[in-house]
Image (tube, rainbow, N blue to C red):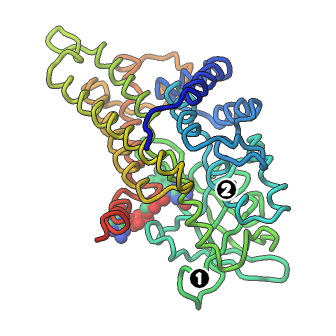
Amino acid sequence: MNLNFSAQDQAFRQEVRTFIARALPADIQHKVVNGLILERDDYVRWQQALHAQGWGGSSWAREFGGTGWSAVQKYIFEEEVAAAGAPRIIPFGVKMVAPVIMAFGSPAQQQRFLPKILSAEEWWCQGYSEPGSGSDLASVQTAAQRDGDHYLVNGQKTWTTQAQYADWIFCLVRTDREAKPQRGISFLLIDMKTPGITVRPIITMDGAHEVNEVWFDNVRVPVENLVGEENAGWTYAKFLLGHERTNIAGIGIAKRELARLKRIASQETKHGKALIQDPQFALRIAQIQVDLTALEITNLRVLSAEEQRKTPGPEASILKIKGTEIQQAITELMTQAVGLYALPLRRDAMAAGYQGEHAGPAYATSLAANYLNMRKLSIYGGSNEIQKNIIAQMILGL
Ligand SMILES: Cc1cc2nc3c(=O)[nH]c(=O)nc-3n(C[C@H](O)[C@H](O)[C@H](O)COP(=O)(O)OP(=O)(O)OC[C@H]3O[C@@H](n4cnc5c(N)ncnc54)[C@H](O)[C@@H]3O)c2cc1C
């Protein structure tokens, strides 16, 4: 195992930094670094900038227009863009459905969908979860019944992130009610403009419209939008979740947010001194720093193993748990640093260009919403409890 970056990797890191300095729009960077509200267009512009560089598919194989980067290069790239204040790459197309289409889709599906994912012309959302099916995903009930050369889809998905922006949704649907739950699921690509689809917003406790319910009422989907084989969707669904877990530790994001925490703690005061000099507060920051460094080393160990084996293993669960705990701990300390000024929850003041008054320092305005929003990290992408089950079974053999 080699945990040091090679000279080539270091040169690559420099290349990524040079690109970011040139291509990351300053207004978008400002929003990310200060926790302000990002619009659809911000994500799209960043994806387009990556695409123009040939880096739109950072984790894709070259034959599909990707970079063909190694696991270490992908890691360096993700870490650098996050630390620099780039928005997250819209994951649903690039990182979720695209790998499935590449591995299991027909050549016609590959030609139809992949280029528009790369160029951000089409926005995707993920239709896995339902009101009764989250952790227990194999119990999905949304039904797709064959009707000639179409499927007739009926049911409901929920927690569908950014469905309000989406042109397409990839869905797990039940095509066989008699078979074992895992054997009766298919993977369908559905045009969001099809009659019978209704998107209803869910407003989360931070006041954001990030997630939705998506309802299907006799939605007609052409059979050619089925990925792979009918009733084999569970295999594709699991394959996708494996991809969702790569780079799950969020090291770059945690580094950026830790730097923000330190900036805030340097400006806040306690007994006439900068808060960051308060021994108790400094100790808590130091603990996060230590945890983050340990996680980074663990991540490199996993990457080193992945380079040999080529697929992400169950160790990704460790990265998910620790990574999300660290990110949540940072948001907690940020709110504590500003005390009462974290209390007002004002989304209008979190928009870039807001000219009105802030209750306290401007940097405090987004902290409560950020704290509340980041609770999601331990729920989605396989909840942290489910990750602990995976560790217990697959790593500890319990
Ligand atoms: C902000 C946000 C965005 C999301 N975006 C999407 C999206 O775009 N598309 C999509 O399809 N889904 C999305 N989800 C849904 C997400 O994947 C589910 O919320 C998640 O899988 C948990 O499922 P659930 O909410 O049904 O909770 P449940 O599965 O009902 O779990 C409830 C609690 O019980 C625990 N639990 C459940 N089973 C076990 C077990 N076997 N052992 C131990 N503990 C267990 C869980 O950890 C949790 O604490 C999103 C969720 C959130 C919060």
Residue situated furthest front in the rendering: 1
Which disc number belongs to residue 183?
1
Position of 263 relative to 151 (above/below): above
Nearer to me, 152 or 391: 391
Query: Can you see residue 396?
Result: yes
Q: Quadrant of residue 105?
A: bottom right
Q: Amino acid at mark 1?
A: Arg
Is residue 361 left or right of 196 when viewed as pictured?
left
* Residue that appears at 47% across and 55% down: 381
**Which element is circle 1 on?**
helix
The x, y position of residue 91, in whole percent, is 60, 47
Answer left or right for 317 relative to 81.
left
Ligand 1 shown in quarter: bottom left
Asked where in the image residue 81 lies, by quadrant, the reply is top right
Residue located farthest toward the top when viewing the structure as drawn: 272
Q: Quadrant of the C terminus?
A: bottom left
Q: Secondary structure at mark 2?
A: helix
Frontmost of labels 1 and 2 is 2
Q: Position of residue 336 (x, y in %)?
A: 25, 29
For image coordinates 44% across by 39% down, the residue present is 2
**With respect to residue 279, does 196 lie above or below?**
below
Is the CB of the residue bearing disc 1 within 8 angstroms of ligand 1? no
Q: Which mark is residue 369?
A: none
Which residue position holds label 2? 99
On the rendered structure, is 119 left or right of 302? right
